[in-house]
Image: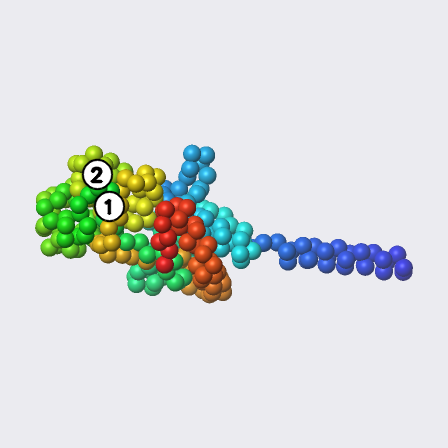
């Protein structure tokens, strides 16, 4: 009888230990992203996934005690990936729109992405009006082109609007004088010009803005609430600004 009681006690103790270990394990969430969107999320020379949004997510995960897995997905199918529970959050320069709000929930905006105007450091161009009679460049098919075309009168004042295959080529032509200005997404533009300090300046005027937020499933209300609180704390204590300066050379968090 004593042997049987001892065996029962040992079994119960083992079960309690296993249960205890289970409660200390970190909960894992899968972060869906496009791994070809520098500087928000991309692969470095070592094939590691890095970027501004990656660092923001890692910091938030650390504060929430969450284990993160970064999963590259087809960004055109991002909402299906999220609602199909193949990822738990979308965190990669995701623009908040009313249409997307019909299918997913968003945190409050953590960043405002403007369509900035970049000129050479010695340029006489000081504002949008000064672009009259000038040659302006932008990436073909980008939201920058849409933003410029949305201001028809200003675009008509240009001498020419030149379209490029990528922003790097446009900035190179700006440097050598083939362009007078470049219009580009702020998150992309500041990332590239931060690598060449003193060569370019960003004007105060811009061609409009959009807001970025983290996307979650509509029924994931608890995670949304916790993540929202954490993002607010990161902004308040200056952590978000620090990460922003590391990637963009300026504080552009909202």
Q: Is residue 99 left or right of residue 62?
A: left
For mark 1, give the secondary structure: strand
Residue at x 10% of width, y 46% of height = 133
Where residue 195 appears, x then y in whole percent? 35, 39
Classify mark 1: residues with Cα within 10 Å, few (<14), some (14-19) or many (20+): many
Where residue 50 appears, x then y in whole percent? 43, 43
Q: Nearer the viewer, residue 47 or 123?
A: 123
Quarter that holds the N terminus: bottom right
Q: Is residue 100 above or below residue 67?
A: below
Q: Which residue is mark 1?
A: 118
The coloring applied to the image is: rainbow
Residue at the right extreme of this rendering: 2
The quarter of the picture where residue 194 lies is top left
Where residue 82 appears, x then y in whole percent? 42, 55
Where residue 73 appears, x then y in whole percent? 40, 46
Q: Is residue 102 left or right of residue 60?
A: left
Q: How many marks?
A: 2
Residue at x 36% of width, y 59% of height = 254
How far apart are the alpha carbons under marks 2 and 1?
A: 9 Å
Can residue 138 be seen from the camera position used here? no
Q: Nearer the viewer, residue 135 or 144?
A: 135
Q: Is residue 174 above or below residue 183?
A: above
For mark 2, give the secondary structure: helix
| Tags 2 and 1 touching, CB below 8 Å | yes
Residue at x 37% of width, y 53% of height = 251
* Label number found at residue 231: none
Q: Nearer the viewer, residue 232 or 81?
A: 232
Residue at x 32% of width, y 40% of height = 197
Which of pointers 2 and 1 lies earlier in the amino acid sequence?
Answer: 1
Q: Which residue is mark 2?
A: 174
């Amino acid at each position: 009888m004593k042997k049987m009681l001892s065996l029962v006690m040992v079994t119960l103790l083992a079960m309690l230990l296993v249960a205890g270990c289970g409660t200390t394990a970190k909960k894992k969430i899968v972060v869906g992203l496009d791994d070809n969107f520098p500087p928000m999320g991309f692969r470095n020379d070592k094939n590691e996934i890095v970027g501004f949004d990656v660092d923001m997510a890692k910091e938030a995960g650390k504060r929430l005690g969450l284990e993160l897995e970064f999963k590259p997905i087809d960004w055109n199918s991002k909402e299906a990936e999220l609602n199909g529970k193949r990822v738990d959050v979308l965190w990669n320069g995701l623009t908040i729109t009313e249409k997307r709000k019909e299918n997913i929930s968003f945190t409050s905006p953590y960043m405002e992405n403007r369509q900035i105007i970049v000129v050479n450091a010695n340029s006489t161009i000081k504002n949008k009006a000064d672009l009259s009679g000038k040659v302006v460049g932008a990436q073909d098919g980008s939201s920058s082109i849409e933003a410029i075309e949305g201001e028809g009168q200003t675009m008509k004042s240009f001498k020419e609007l030149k379209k490029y295959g990528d922003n790097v080529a446009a900035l190179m032509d700006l440097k050598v004088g083939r362009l007078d200005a470049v219009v580009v997404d702020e998150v992309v533009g500041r990332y590239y010009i931060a690598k060449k300090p003193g060569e370019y300046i960003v004007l105060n005027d811009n061609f409009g803005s959009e807001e970025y937020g983290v996307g979650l499933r509509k029924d994931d209300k608890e995670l949304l609430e916790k993540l929202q609180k954490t993002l607010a704390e990161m902004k308040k204590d200056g952590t978000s600004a620090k990460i922003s300066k590391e990637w963009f050379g300026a504080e552009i968090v909202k």
